[in-house]
């Protein structure tokens, strides 16, 4: 079952409240997305830790309802 981009964004923002989330449906099929997540809470964390935070926010849906997510994370400038 496909997952809507709005649901992905909502889950990430619930888990990382200050996150700025940009979602792109890569194939138009609701199964393959790219996400850019920017959050000050990522400051001082490794890229792996940042990605783990996003995956935790997705509440176990990665690999199930959410088939594929190309994830990019960043700390906002000046944070």
Image: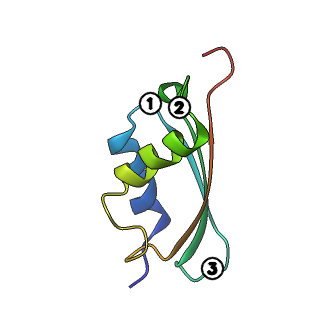
Disc 2, disc 1: CB below 8 Å?
yes
Please, is residue 42 above or below residue 55 in the view?
Answer: above
Please, is residue 62 above or below residue 40 in the view?
Answer: below
Left or right of 60 on screen, residue 26: right
* Residue 67 position within the rendered picture, expressed as x and y whole percent measured from the top left: 49, 77
Q: Closer to us: mark 3 or mark 1?
A: 1
Image coloring type: rainbow
Disc 3, disc 2: CB below 8 Å?
no
Q: Closer to us: mark 3 or mark 2?
A: 2
SS label for mark 1: loop
Identify the residue at image location x=38%, y=76%: 65
Q: Which residue is mark 2?
A: 39
Q: Which residue is mark 3?
A: 28
Question: Which residue is more in the foreground, 4 or 51?
Answer: 51
Identify the residue at image location x=39%, y=61%: 7
Mark 3 burial class by Cα count in 10 Å: few <14, some 14-19, many 20+:
few
Distance CA(mark 3)–CA(mark 2): 27 Å
Image quadrant in which the C terminus is located: top right
* Residue 61 position within the rendered picture, expressed as x and y whole percent measured from the top left: 35, 67
SS label for mark 3: loop
Identify the residue at image location x=44%, y=72%: 66
Please, is residue 30 above or below residue 71 in the view?
Answer: below
SS label for mark 2: loop
Q: Which residue is mark 1?
A: 18
Precedes in sequence: disc 3 or disc 2: 3
Precedes in sequence: disc 3 or disc 1: 1
């Amino acid at each position: 079952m496909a997952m809507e981009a709005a649901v992905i964004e909502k889950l990430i923002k619930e888990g990382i409240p200050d996150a700025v989330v940009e979602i792109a449906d890569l194939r138009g099929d609701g199964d393959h997305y790219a996400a850019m997540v920017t959050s000050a809470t990522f400051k001082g964390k490794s890229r792996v830790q940042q990605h783990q935070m996003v995956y935790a926010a997705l509440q176990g849906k990665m690999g199930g309802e959410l088939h594929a997510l190309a994830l990019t994370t960043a700390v906002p400038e000046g944070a």
